[in-house]
Amino acid sequence: MRFLYRVGLLAGLGVLVLFVFGYSVLNTSVAAIAQDSDSVKRNKLGLQLDANDHKKQQDSSKGGRDPSLNTQAQGMFEGGRPSARPPLTCPVPMSYWFPPDACPLHQPLCGLYVCSPKASMHLAVVACGDRTNETLVMLKSALIFTSTKLHCHIFAETDLHFGFRQQVDSWPASIHEKLTYTIYPIMYPPGENSQEWKKLFRPCASQRLFLPELLTDVDSLLYVDTDILFLSPMENLWNFFSAMNSTQLAALAPEHEVKSIGWYNRFARHPYYGETGLNSGIMLMNLTRLRAFHFQDKIIPYYKEYKLKLTWGDQDLLNILFHYYPERLLVFPCEWNYRPDHCMYMQNCKSAETHGVRMVHGCRRVFFNEKQPAFKAIYEAIEQYKLDTDISLLLEGMKAKMEEPDTKASRCGQVANMFLKQVESSVRKASGETTP
């Protein structure tokens, strides 16, 4: 009897110990859950990615969408640009970013992007020779219209570095609140003939082909030639990253819109993209995808194969590559890369007629000669405009120069309204007026 009593007593104590231990474990778990509520939310959203999801995340980056998403949400355009997207607050910031007006439509995508105005867009330019001032005017034009923080990557010959720093650092403090920059020397891959690459077409222009392997900490960026001027916010062009599908690496504008004046379809001695080729002066680059694609390893053999047939250097190489990989490219309208060819013979950029010129490309040095006075007028107006002053003063300066007799009489000057339309829109926005 005593034996049974002792057994019962021990069993009761065992149950009591298990109860106390279980209660303690339960409390610890509840506390852990309370302290890590964000983790719970991530689990609910499916944002704690496993190894495969992480690979998908890095591949999608800023340049594309998860291919499993509704395809109707991909590549939507309105008025020659990606359609406006409603603001979205991302519950869990991750490592990739879009400006607020380009945030994805679908809540689960928040794990792949940071919808934060505090992050930076990345702009890259390559400057050699006498291109310092032209580069500064380009950067100035970007800063006039953008409201988002911008990091500029300037690749330049070493003897130009001091001049860049001196000029940029002299800009108003308000400009440096949204601008940061890094200056790099000109660099080519080990084992390559640097002097040969440097002389390909315009001095140092081929540097852009090696940006994916040089800027390894940058996911996506906008590359521009030095002879580019922004007439609208860079954010609007950046939105094309959100229009890319899951395979596309980059975005470019066509070289020509009509075959009758096309250069590639009449003269090229090598493969090129589409019917009229591509112009490479403005290029959205998803560096993450370009690295995964082994872009550099493909471009160098193309150069060795076709180098005796290249006329436009790095642009020709991009045409060759996207001829063989057309599915890897997104093409944006000519209003984003408006050149003298679009108006010097006839008006052949329909999207600019409707929406105005958003970015000007002053190829063939038209910012500095008398061949296309309308382009020179736009450049001089931006060069003379003082940063951090009323943008309406810039518009007044442009209008005055467009009214000069030689400019007004030129073919491109006859469509001055196209050059001014986007600037007028920015002035209205700055003054609080609604765009008609």
Image: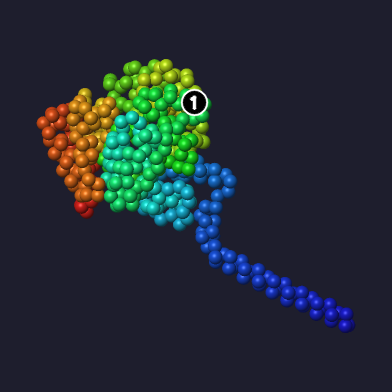
Q: Give the quadrant of the N terminus.
A: bottom right
Badge 1: residue crowd in 10 Å (few <14, some 14–19, many ≥20): few
Q: Which image quadrant is residue 82 in?
A: top left
Q: Residue furthest left?
A: 405
Q: In this view of the protein, which residue sits in the foreground, 214 or 373?
A: 214
Colouring method of the image: rainbow
Residue 302 screen position, x and y as percent:
47, 23
Which residue is at a point 42% across and 38% down the rendered structure image?
Answer: 184
- Relative height, residue 431 to residue 274 (above, below): below
Give the residue pinned by disc 1. Answer: 192
Which residue is at a point 37% across and 52% down the rendered structure image?
Answer: 117
**Figure label count:** 1
Q: Is residue 83 left or right of residue 400?
A: right
What type is the residue that disc 1 sits on?
Answer: Glu
Q: Which image quadrant is residue 355 in?
A: top left
Q: Residue furthest bottom?
A: 2
Q: Is residue 299 left or right of residue 118?
A: right
Q: In this view of the protein, which residue sits in the foreground, 128 or 413?
A: 128
Residue 236 screen position, x and y as percent:
32, 43
Q: Is residue 214 left or right of residue 80?
A: right
Q: Is residue 367 visible?
A: yes
Which residue is at a point 47% across and 20% down the rendered structure image?
Answer: 304
- Relative height, residue 314 to residue 172 (above, below): above
Q: Which image quadrant is residue 195 in?
A: top left
Residue 46 screen position, x and y as percent:
53, 53
- Relative height, residue 285 to residue 169 (above, below): above
Which residue is at a point 84% across and 80% down the rendered structure image?
Answer: 6
Q: Is residue 240 visible?
A: no
Q: In this view of the protein, which residue sits in the foreground, 264 or 208?
A: 208
Secondary structure of the residue carrying numbered label 1? loop
Residue 154 screen position, x and y as percent:
38, 38
